[in-house]
Image (tube, grey):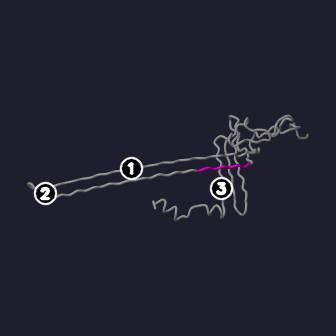
Amino acid sequence: MGAPAAGQSLYDESSWRPLTGDNKAFRAGDVLTVQVFENSSAVTSADTGTRRNNSLQAELAHGPRTVAQTSLGVGGDFEGGGRTQRASRLLTTVTVVVQEVLPNGQLRIAGDQVLTVNEELQRVTLEGVVRAVDIGHGNVVQSTRIADARITYVGEGDLSERQRRAWWRRLFDAVGF
């Protein structure tokens, strides 16, 4: 006798899509394009002023004449202020991979893009959670629709290194010089 016959399906249910289905990411391993449009700005200012004046006087008298007289005066003024202003803007497109489909149907995504321009390495790393309904036409989602988004943009090379403060300047700042 021969081996028993076994039936197999004509398609793999884990990867099959209906003919009328869209091409949106919906399972682990699918790719998704993220358009990163991030603008941020912050302004902080503070003004401080303090003044203090103390005085102490003492007099020692013996009869009608003054034997000893002394006085002590202490005063201090402090004026301080500061202003911090920062603005940043990041515009890029990054293709990420669906890492996991969460029990509620949301997609945990992660990916990075590395680009070298004029010997400067530029790296964009992105991760977060996306609702399937936020994935638009062309399998694209906006970065503003990503929950728990972590977007990191880092440059490495001579230009980036020159923009960092010198170690001795950071030391002096920490000590208060």
Q: Name the kind of residue labelled 1 in the image.
A: Thr
Q: Is residue 49 above or below residue 11?
A: below
The kind of residue on which mark 2 rests is Thr
Counting from the top left corner in percent of width and height, residue 12 is at 83, 39
Disc 2 element = strand
**Between 12 and 147, the one nearer to me in the picture:** 147
> Which is in the foreground here, disc 1 or disc 3?
1
Q: What residue do we see at 20% from left, 58% from top?
A: 70
**Number of the front mark, 3 or 2:** 2
| Mark 3–mark 2 CB contact (< 8 Å) | no
Give the magenta part as a residue range: 86-93
- Total marks in image: 3
| Disc 2: which residue | 66
Kindly check if marks 2 and 1 are in contact, taking CB atoms under 8 A apart as contact: no
- The residue lying furthest to the right in this view is 1
Quadrant of residue 106 within the rendered picture? top right
Label 2 neighbourhood size at 10 Å, few (<14), some (14-19), many (20+)? Answer: few
User: How many other residues sit within 10 Å of disc 3, few (<14), some (14-19) or many (≥20)?
Assistant: few
